Amino acid sequence: MTELTTGSCLCGTVAFQVAGDFDRFFLCHCSRCRKVTGSAHAANLFSVTATLTWLAGEDRIKTFKVPGTRFEKSFCMDCGSALPVVRENGIGMMVPAGSLDSSLSIRPNAHIFCASRADWDDHLDLVQQVDGLPI
């Protein structure tokens, strides 16, 4: 059965739908992914067969490409939220997992570019876990 997944940006201006299955789910620790997320890693889903439909706000999407590379980042121009990127040739897409409103049936396949991990990104499972804002 083909999966139907929905997502949006933080402010709700941009909404999208992905029809099809995701092939891979990577947690990427490369320096570029750390820069664009401001975090330890990016959580990105990939598909070469799924199709993306913009439901709202397509005119508010900006895409930045690092010159001379394949690295691209799409985001909402209003709130800055990460959004899907469809490759220039139209074959394949990357969807930031955090942009999805639907639950996923796929789990991450791997941590990648671990040699580039931030030096503070080690043994995070040992850090205190709090269900809300700490007091």
Image: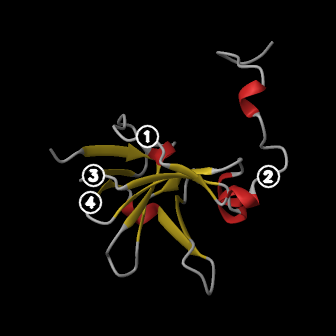
Please give left or right for residue 73 compared with residue 116 in the image: left
Provide residue 103's location: percent of width, then percent of height: 36, 34
**Residue designated by label 1:** 107
Say which label, 2 or 1, has the lower sequence index.
Answer: 1
**Residue designated by label 4:** 50
Provide residue 125's location: percent of width, then percent of height: 71, 28
Q: Residue at x 32, y 74 (%)?
A: 91
Report if the CB atoms under discs 4 and 1 are less than 8 Å apart.
no
Say which label, 4 or 2, has the lower sequence index.
Answer: 4
Label at residue 21: 3
**Residue designated by label 2:** 118
- Under mark 2, the amino acid is Ala
Residue at the farthest right position: 119
Report if the CB atoms under discs 3 and 4 are less than 8 Å apart.
yes
Q: Residue at x 77, y 16 (%)?
A: 134
Mark 2: give few (<14), some (14-19) or many (20+) Cα within 10 Å.
Answer: some
The mark total stands at 4
